[in-house]
Amino acid sequence: MTKPLIGVTSGDRIFFQTDYFEGIRVSYTLSTITNAVIAAGGLPVNIPIHNKDLSHHYLEQLDGLVLSGGTDVSPHLYGETVQPKIDRTDPQRDEREIALIEAAFDKGLPILGICRGFQLVNVMLGGSLYQDLSYREGTFIQHNQLSNSDIPVHSINVNPDSHFASLTPDKTTVNSYHHQAIKDLSPELTRSAWADDGVIEAAEAINDKYDFIGVQYHPESLADEYPVHRALFEDFVERIRKK
Ligand code: MN
């Protein structure tokens, strides 16, 4: 059986800097994501932050898209100016990923959004973000965990009517590596899971117009050890195979 080709978006950063070199830039994708895609039966390929004119060429070959975590989404994309606690942003990455995601949605490709990837799609589809969780009333969970990423730290409440619920039981525990969160959820998305303090932890498209599931946590870091978190990737590959 042919394995579906799954693009995984990458970060771009200086990897190496000494007195002798200006610094070498690397395009990187987390091995935890590519490993989880491979374990689910997919064939992952890293998509660098590319010239946006190349998006359609990528999409001619890809069967699915995983949007990885990374820098904060630029607040101007949801009509705000930068607040004091915003972290690093990368407008070029935003612009080029948006072109890629639009092309993928046009083609009807299944998309799995992780952390920043989830937030970016929410913003693209008309939603907004808290630039830092300290700006949100009523947050009482530590969402930016200090423990290793393979340790689940808080539980989630799951909407029983969601597709997500068929993969992830209510009260599943997840890891938490985010200082931002969804503020206004896009009208194209519905809440699939939330933490006890109400922070949105997963959402999915309200209808077939977009084949999208987004999660605020990092299932890729838990997929190796916990079948429940592997299920998200298995479902993703399954959705691709059904197309
Ligand atoms: Mn969280």
Image (cartoon, grey):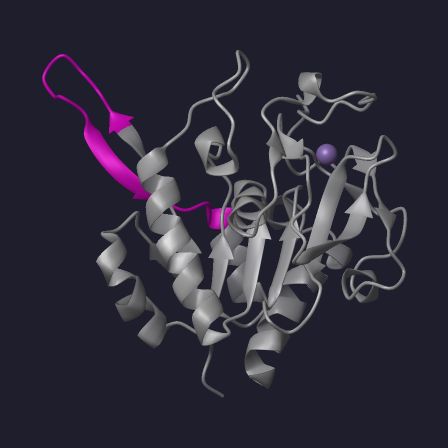
Q: Is residue 56 left or right of residue 200?
A: left
**Magenta stretch contains residue 26:** yes
Figure quadrant of residue 24: top left
Left/right of residue 62 with respect to residue 55 in the rendered view: right
Q: Nearer the viewer, residue 105 or 242?
A: 105
Residue at the bottom extreme? 1
Quarter residue 173 falls in: top right
The image quarter in which residue 194 lies: top right
Where residue 2 sits: x, y (%)? 45, 85
- Return the residue found at the far front: 79
Which portion, as a residue range, is magenta?
15-32
Q: Judge whether 207 appears above or below 221 on screen.
A: below
The percent coordinates of residue 96 (x first, y second) are 33, 49
Q: 132 or 76, which is in the foreground?
A: 76
Q: How many marks?
A: 0
Q: Nearer the viewer, residue 6 or 181?
A: 181
> Residue 39 at x, y = what percent?
57, 65
Q: Looking at the figure, which quarter contains the C terminus?
A: bottom right
Q: Is residue 145 positioned above or below 163 on the image? A: above
Residue occupying image coordinates x 30% and y 47%: 49
In the rendered image, residue 106 lying in the magenta stretch gets the answer no
Above or below, comparing residue 198 to residue 141 in the picture? below
Tell me where residue 8 appears, x and y as whole percent: 43, 56
Residue at image position (82%, 67%) is 166
Would residue 103 be found to the left or right of residue 171 on screen?
left
* Residue 11 shows in the view: no
Q: Residue, x 48% and y 22% (percent of image)?
A: 81
Residue positioned 44% across, 58% down in the render: 101
- Left or right: 153 as drawn, with respect to 104: right
